[in-house]
């Protein structure tokens, strides 16, 4: 391996992400559109169908430590491409920050790629509104939710 490539890899590995004057060890999850179909009060469940498994860890951007008991609200289109109360869920990250949602592969919605909406809240952290974009042909995905402290 060339020395310049090795140095670049080391630099990237140890680089802390800086945003707004704050340094983060973990890259915060990008914010994405909430969309018009969010409704509070989704039932607590980890299953909205079968065939697609979404999992990840909720983490603190400052030190990459897991965040337990983060509330994760999810909503998506049904297999018919329509939003419906049947395709909403509330789940919580476990003691190690891990969460898991089983669903089907999201249905199409207009010209948008398949997606799963998420709002994440945890004490002491900014609310995160984001979306996971499943890859067609895959039966699961990993989507870590990295939160910024308040």
Image (cartoon, rainbow, N blue to C red):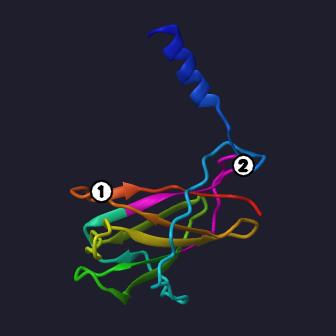
Q: How many marks?
A: 2
Q: Is residue 36 left or right of residue 52?
A: right
User: Does residue 68 show up magenta in the picture?
Assistant: yes
- Farthest-out residue, front: 111
C-alpha separation, residue under disc 1 versus residue under disc 2: 29 Å
Res 41 quadrant in image: bottom right
Q: Image quadrant for the C terminus?
A: bottom right
Question: Measured from the top left, where is residue 79 in percent x and y?
Answer: 24, 79
Q: Residues within 10 Å of mark 1 (few under 14, many from 20)?
A: few
Question: Measured from the top left, where is residue 3 in percent x and y?
Answer: 52, 9
As rendered, which of 80 and 43 lies closer to the eye?
80
Residue at 37% in and 61% down: 133
Question: Measured from the top left, where is residue 68 in percent x and y?
Answer: 63, 64
Residue at 64% in and 32% down: 15
Secondary structure at numbered mark 1: loop
Q: In terms of sequence position, does the residue under pointer 1 or pointer 2 come before the other?
A: 2
Secondary structure at numbered mark 2: loop
95 shown above or below 43: above
Residue at 47% in and 84% down: 36
Q: Tag on residue 64?
A: none
The span shown in magenta is 54-72
User: Does residue 63 show up magenta in the picture?
Assistant: yes
Question: Measured from the top left, where is residue 21 in percent x and y?
Answer: 78, 47
As rendered, which of 88 and 50 lies closer to the eye?
88
Q: Is residue 15 left or right of residue 35?
A: right
Res 7 quadrant in image: top right
50 shown above or below 144: below
Q: Image quadrant for the N terminus?
A: top left
Asked if the residue at tag 2 contacts the one at tag 1, i.e. Cβ–Cβ closer than 8 Å, the answer is no
Q: Is residue 96 left or right of residue 134?
A: right
Residue beneath label 1, please?
135
Residue beneath label 2, please?
62
């Amino acid at each position: 391996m060339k020395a310049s490539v090795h140095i670049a890899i080391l630099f990237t590995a140890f680089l802390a992400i800086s945003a707004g004057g704050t340094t983060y060890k973990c890259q915060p999850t990008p914010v994405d559109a909430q969309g018009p179909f969010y409704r509070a009060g989704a039932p607590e469940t980890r299953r909205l169908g079968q065939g697609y498994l979404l999992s990840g860890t909720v983490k603190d951007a400052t030190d990459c430590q897991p965040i337990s008991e983060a509330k994760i609200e999810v909503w998506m289109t049904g297999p018919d491409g329509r939003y419906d109360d049947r395709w909403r869920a509330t789940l919580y990250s476990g003691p190690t920050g891990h969460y898991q949602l089983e669903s089907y592969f999201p249905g199409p919605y207009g010209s948008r790629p398949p997606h799963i909406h998420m709002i994440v809240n945890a004490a002491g952290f900014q609310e995160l509104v984001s979306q996971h974009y499943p890859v067609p042909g895959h039966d699961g995905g990993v989507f870590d939710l990295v939160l910024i402290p308040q």
